[in-house]
Amino acid sequence: MSTFENRDGTALLVVDVQNDVVGGAHRRDEVVARIGDLVDRARAAGTPVVWVQHSDEGMAEGSEEWRIVPELVPGEGEPVVQKHYGDSFEATDLEDVLAAAGVGHLVVTGAETDACIRSTIHGAFTRGYDVTLVGDAHTAGDKSAWGAPPVADVIAHTNLYWQFQGAPGRRAAVVEAGEVVFDG
């Protein structure tokens, strides 16, 4: 149903599951394990897995902080998109990667819920993609010292509003990891 012709494929998008980003994240180990399971299931079904990796002044490319967590390893030939902004599409080759794979539907996981996940799901949706957020496979660090709500509330709010997102010719959804079905 996306707005793209001849792009009815689905991809699993794994956003910023990097050492520094999820080091102190809410339910880190549970979320990383769920993402690992989703990656395994997507690979088994022949669904593309696309990785996104952020860098900035505080997280230099090539540093230990920048590396994807050791529990998750991009597979041979799986694209790793490098980004410098919250939206994984902004100034990256993500759109080209997805177009080449015939993808019009994204299943989104990763971090941080209140930054790169929100920016990416909105960026994908406005570009014409159907976007499914995996409600129990995204996380963030605690920003309550700066006035943000507790992380569990940030996650719950994002899941709540995303399930009601709408636009012509596109679908938004929130599902739990166990409900995700990859069909290649």
Image: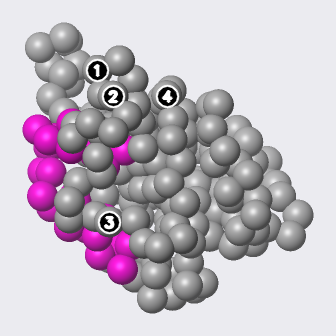
Q: Earlier in the sequence, mark 3 or mark 4?
A: 3
What amino acid type should be assigned to the residue bearing mark 4?
Answer: His
Q: Earlier in the sequence, mark 1 or mark 3?
A: 1
Residue at 29% over, 46% down: 67
**How dense is the environment of label 1, judged by Cα within 10 Å: few (below 14), some, or many (20 and up)?**
few
Question: In the image, which residues are magenta?
Answer: 16-40
What amino acid type should be assigned to the residue bearing mark 3?
Answer: Val
Asked which colour scheme the image uses, the reply is: one colour
Which mark is on residue 58? 1
Measured as percent of width and height from the top left, residue 128 is found at: 75, 48
User: Which structural element holds mark 4?
Assistant: loop
Which mark is on residue 41? none
- Residue carrying label 4: 84
> Is residue 151 placed above or below 108 in the rendered structure?
above
**How dense is the environment of label 2, judged by Cα within 10 Å: few (below 14), some, or many (20 and up)?**
few
The reply to whether residue 35 is in sight is: yes
As measured in the structure, the alpha-carbon distance from the residue carrying label 2 to the one carrying label 4 is 10 Å
Q: Earlier in the sequence, mark 1 or mark 4?
A: 1
Q: Earlier in the sequence, mark 3 or mark 2?
A: 2
As measured in the structure, the alpha-carbon distance from the residue carrying label 3 to the one carrying label 2 is 19 Å
- Residue carrying label 2: 60
- Residue carrying label 3: 73
User: Which structural element holds mark 2?
Assistant: loop
Q: Dividing the picture into quarters, in which one does residue 60 lie?
A: top left
As measured in the structure, the alpha-carbon distance from the residue carrying label 1 to the one carrying label 4 is 11 Å
What amino acid type should be assigned to the residue bearing mark 2?
Answer: Ala
User: Which structural element holds mark 1?
Assistant: loop
Quadrant showing the C terminus: bottom right
Quadrant showing the N terminus: bottom right
Taking the view exactly as shown, the residue that stands out farthest to the right is: 5
